[in-house]
Amino acid sequence: MTTDSQSDDHIASALLSGTTYERVRYQRHAFLRQSVPRTLMLQSALLGLLVALLLMYGLFPASAAGYLPATDPAVASPKVLLLGVLGGALELFGATLLVGTALYRVRRASLTESQAHTMLDIEDFARYVGLGTGGLAILLTVGVFAVGLGGGTAVDAYVEIAGANPFVASGAGLPVVAVSLVAFVASVVLFYAGGYLSVRLSQTRRD
């Protein structure tokens, strides 16, 4: 059986299952249609990329030191890091909304069509905020940090193109180590939250 036919069978099963939420979900047109547990797993992975910033910063060549606020990631707070912090905050905001809708579905079990539309509206918004805007901010942050791995020459070329050094001190007092640590904890929490909700939602559908 091909992947397409398996997907079609899954959708057909959802439409015929009698579950209002699943029926409305597959009838709606949305670019991001992952289930809540799947979305939380993806958000966990994106937050994991922020953890990688610590390793990347530690691998910056010595030639890039002149562009950095400090070579020690425990005290360095480059300006570009704030973009990653924004992305992480959006991930957590979106994840909070998704967890809330999932717990509401577990508690209510059977939703009316109006309630299903409301839950899906919130979920769509949460996905666009988290996976969309937050994910883009995190990927851009990782991309700029990757420039630093190229050393002073690469950073200098970036500065000439962008017109500014992304690694100047942010003045926010948020060092790379602290941001990576918080991102790690948040990533683990979202990973287990996705697994927990996957089981609970499956039980609710069976009931």
Image (cartoon, rainbow, N blue to C red):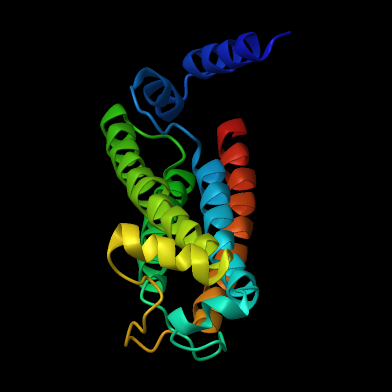
The foreground one among 135 and 142 is: 142
Image coordinates of residue 71 in percent, x first then y, are 55, 87
Q: Position of residue 23 (x, y in %)?
A: 42, 21
Quadrant in the picture for the C terminus: top right
Whether residue 91 sits left or right of residue 163 in the image: it is right
Residue 137's place in the image compared with 174, above or below, is above
* Quadrant location of the N terminus in the rendered image: top right
- Can the viewer see residue 48? yes
Q: Residue at x 42, y 55 (%)?
A: 140
Residue placed furthest toward the right: 1
In front here: 177 or 13?
A: 177
Displayed quadrant of residue 202: top right
Question: Is residue 176 placed above or below 14 in the rendered structure?
Answer: below
Q: What residue appears at the point 45 percent right and 61 percent down from the top-left corner?
A: 144
Q: Quadrant of residue 141?
A: bottom left
Could you tell me residue 113's position as x and y percent?
30, 27
